Image (cartoon, helix red, strand yellow):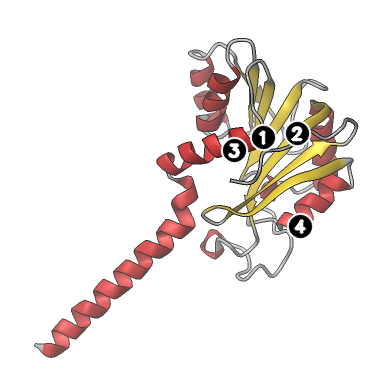
Amino acid sequence: MVIWKIALAAVGVAALGAAAFLYVAFGAFLPWREDAEFARLAHIAQVGSGQTVAEIGAGGGRFAVALAQRVGPGGRVYATELSPARLAELRGHASRVANLTVVEATATETRLPDRCCHLVLMRTVYHHIADPQRFVSAVRRALVPGGRLVIIDFEPGALWFHGGPAGGAADRTPGHGVSQAVAAQEFSAAGFVVEHQVRAWSGPLWMTVLRRDDAPAGRLPPEL
């Protein structure tokens, strides 16, 4: 009887540990956490009424729709995707959100108009990019002079169950993470300046704000 009690207690501890692990690992992807994350992101990146914003790899459109509401009827949001299923979801949103435009992108081209955006957002997208140099140039072209870029992603090995090497053995593992430092270096080499970095952004994610360097830097609010 005592053995069974010990075994059940061990199972309970293991279950609690697994639950805690899953919360840390996946917490950044829960809807209510995403809402809080978006509010913080919009504040730090200074998303405002009348701006033109793009979300590259917009997925199901949760952030893209929130951005469209934030910039208001005088603004515009471009939502890009590769997947036909995701594009269909986004077009469904666009049929109800007047200032949301869906763009079918490619693996190396955003297909955004040149100098169209005050801000570009990439959330858990950049680690998928296999040709960073070409892609970074495409992102730069889409931004107005002085425009901002927000990258949110995770280090290689941070989500070891997602695939790739555990422990962050590489700085870039396409599909399985990208180092915050490497992402900053790749964009800095293409004419961006790092304005703000948060190592522990949400769950396993980090966040970096960069600015296209051909305009004076604006003052960012303090880190929240």
Residue of label 3 = 41
Count of numbered marks: 4
How many angstroms separate mark 3 from mark 4 (CA)?
A: 20 Å
How many angstroms separate mark 1 from mark 2 (CA)?
A: 7 Å
How many angstroms separate mark 3 from mark 2 (CA)?
A: 12 Å
Residue 5 is marked as none
Along the horizontal axis of the image, is 115 left or right of 50? right
Q: Amino acid at mark 4?
A: Ala
Instruction: Between residue 43 and residue 143, name the one nearer to us.
Output: 43
Query: What is the x, y in percent for residue 96?
Result: 48, 13
Which comes before the other along the chain, label 3 or label 4?
3
How many angstroms separate mark 2 from mark 4 (CA)?
A: 18 Å
Residue of label 2 = 148
Which comes before the other along the chain, label 2 or label 4?
2
Residue 45 is marked as 1
Residue of label 4 = 181
Along the horizontal axis of the image, is 15 left or right of 48? left
How many angstroms separate mark 3 from mark 1 (CA)?
A: 6 Å
